Amino acid sequence: MLECKVMATPMDSNLKLLADDSLELVVVTHYRQIIGSLMYLTNTKPDICFAVNTLSQYLVQPIWVHLVAAKHVMRYLKGTIDFGLYYDGSHEYRLYGYTDADWAGSISDRKSTLGGCYSLGSSMISWFSRKQSSVALSTAKAEYISACSAICEAIWLRKLISGLLDLKMDTTLILCDNESCDNREPCVLS
């Protein structure tokens, strides 16, 4: 693994991993060991959480494409071993949120995946990515569900930060990558 080509992202964004019985199976124990090691690494490398979560859904019957995707994550880790987060205390305490959804991104159940992240001043402090609990019938509905989740998380973060740092925060700006309309106005949470 030391002499490998490094990857720029933890997972190919266009990769669709299907549970298909007709494809070549791999050694289950080996695949589970790799995923277990990657799960341990998510404590210090949160940027691989989505990829590891996706790959861990295939622990029962992994196929060749799942093993290749797991090795892709390891090659990404090889190239980002010296990366880290830097928090600068001299910036403003304003919470910014970013959210997006992929409409019907899961091929198996047609559910959308929503995601978002929050920065406080100059650095990222929180992020989330999860499959929506219901099937969205349009891009607008998927984006709406994503924005609602982002607002709920922002309210929780504002209460947590205000309680921990004992300060009054500025308004929170939540930016949504909404492909369903031309309106690019941000949501403002006071």
Image (cartoon, rainbow, N blue to C red):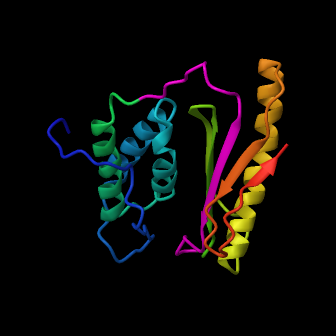
Camera-side residue: 175 or 37?
175
In percent of the image, x 41 and y 74: which residue is there?
20
Q: Residue furthest left?
A: 3
**Dominant secondary structure (helix, strand or loop) of the stretch shown in magenta:** loop
- Quadrant of the rendering where the N terminus is positioned: top left
The quarter of the displayed image where residue 170 is located: top right
Against 141, residue 12 (above or below) is above
In percent of the image, x 82 and y 22: which residue is there?
167
Residue 99 in magenta?
A: yes
In percent of the image, x 82 and y 47: which residue is there?
189
Q: Across the whole image, how many numbered discs are drawn on residues?
A: 0
Against 37, residue 141 (above or below) is below
Query: Relative to residue 144, is residue 139 drawn left or right?
Result: left
Q: Position of residue 65 (x, y in %)?
A: 32, 64
The quarter of the displayed image where residue 118 is located: top right
Q: Where is residue 10 in the image (x, y as percent from the top left)?
A: 38, 49
Camera-side residue: 159 or 169?
169
- Quadrant of the rendering where the C terminus is positioned: top right
Q: Position of residue 159 (x, y in %)?
A: 83, 32
In percent of the image, x 66 and y 64: which residue is there?
184
Where does the magenta region start and end? 84-108
Camera-side residue: 2 or 63?
2
Q: Which residue lies furthest to the bottom in this view?
A: 137
Query: Relative to residue 11, is residue 172 drawn left or right?
Result: right
Residue 71 in magenta?
A: no
Query: Relative to residue 172, is residue 6 drawn left or right?
Result: left
The quarter of the displayed image where residue 77 is located: top left
Let me know if residue 135 appears in the view: no
Q: Where is residue 142 in the image (x, y as percent from the top left)?
A: 68, 70
Let me know if residue 136 appears in the view: yes
